[in-house]
Image (cartoon, helix red, strand yellow):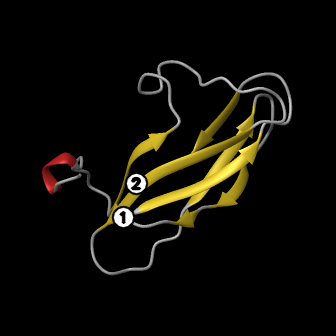
């Protein structure tokens, strides 16, 4: 359970924490096989009562731009989206 002391303080209005999957805080890549689906989850909170929208940005190694995938709101400030591994090599993702 998160408390307000668990949420990092920042100058912006939106805080994104607990992004999964991740390897040791992002130090190591996760591993998947071609054709696997990767389900990405994150806790996203903001001050105020604005309606939030989140996107998952996926960029395969060597691609000139990222693909934007809308994330779905789940209970307790969690957001989810998934993508399919299209080929060998590294692929980065960002919420």
Q: Which mark is residue 30?
A: none
Give the mark nearer the N terminus: 1 vs 2. Answer: 2
Residue to which mark 1 is pinned: 76
Residue at the image position 69 percent from the left and 44 percent from the top: 58
Residue farthest to the top? 28
Is any part of residue 66 visible from this angle?
A: no
Query: Do callouts 1 and 2 mark residues in contact (Cβ within 8 Å)?
Result: yes
Residue at the image position 53 percent from the left and 36 percent from the top: 21
Residue 64 placement, left or right of 55: right
- State the separation of the CA atoms marked 1 and 2: 8 Å
The image quarter in which residue 29 lies: top right
In the rendered image, the vertical position of residue 67 relative to residue 53, given as above or below: above
Residue at the image position 46 percent from the left and 72 percent from the top: 52
Query: Where residue 47 appears, x then y in whole percent?
Result: 27, 70
Task: Give the class, few, some or many, for how many residues have Cα within 10 Å of label 1's Cα (few <14, many ≥20).
Answer: few
Residue to which mark 2 is pinned: 43
Residue 94 placement, left or right of 68: left
Query: Where residue 31 appears, x then y in whole percent?
Result: 66, 23
Task: Give the class, few, some or many, for how many residues have Cα within 10 Å of label 2's Cα (few <14, many ≥20).
Answer: some
Residue 25 placement, left or right of 46: right
What SS does tag 2 mark?
Answer: strand
Frontmost residue, 35 versus 44: 35
In the rendered image, the vertical position of residue 91 relative to residue 4, given as above or below: above
Camera-side mark, 1 or 2: 1
The image quarter in which residue 60 lies: top right
Query: Where residue 15 appears, x then y in whole percent?
Result: 34, 55
What SS does tag 1 mark?
Answer: loop
């Amino acid at each position: 359970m998160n408390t307000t002391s668990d949420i990092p303080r920042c100058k912006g209005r939106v805080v994104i924490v607990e992004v999964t999957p991740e390897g040791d805080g992002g130090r190591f890549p996760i591993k998947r096989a071609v054709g696997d689906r990767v389900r990405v989850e994150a806790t996203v909170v903001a001050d105020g009562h604005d309606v939030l929208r989140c996107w998952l940005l996926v960029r395969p190694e060597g691609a000139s731009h990222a693909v934007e995938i809308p994330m779905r709101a789940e209970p307790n400030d969690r957001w989810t989206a998934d993508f399919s591994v299209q080929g060998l090599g590294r692929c980065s993702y960002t919420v």
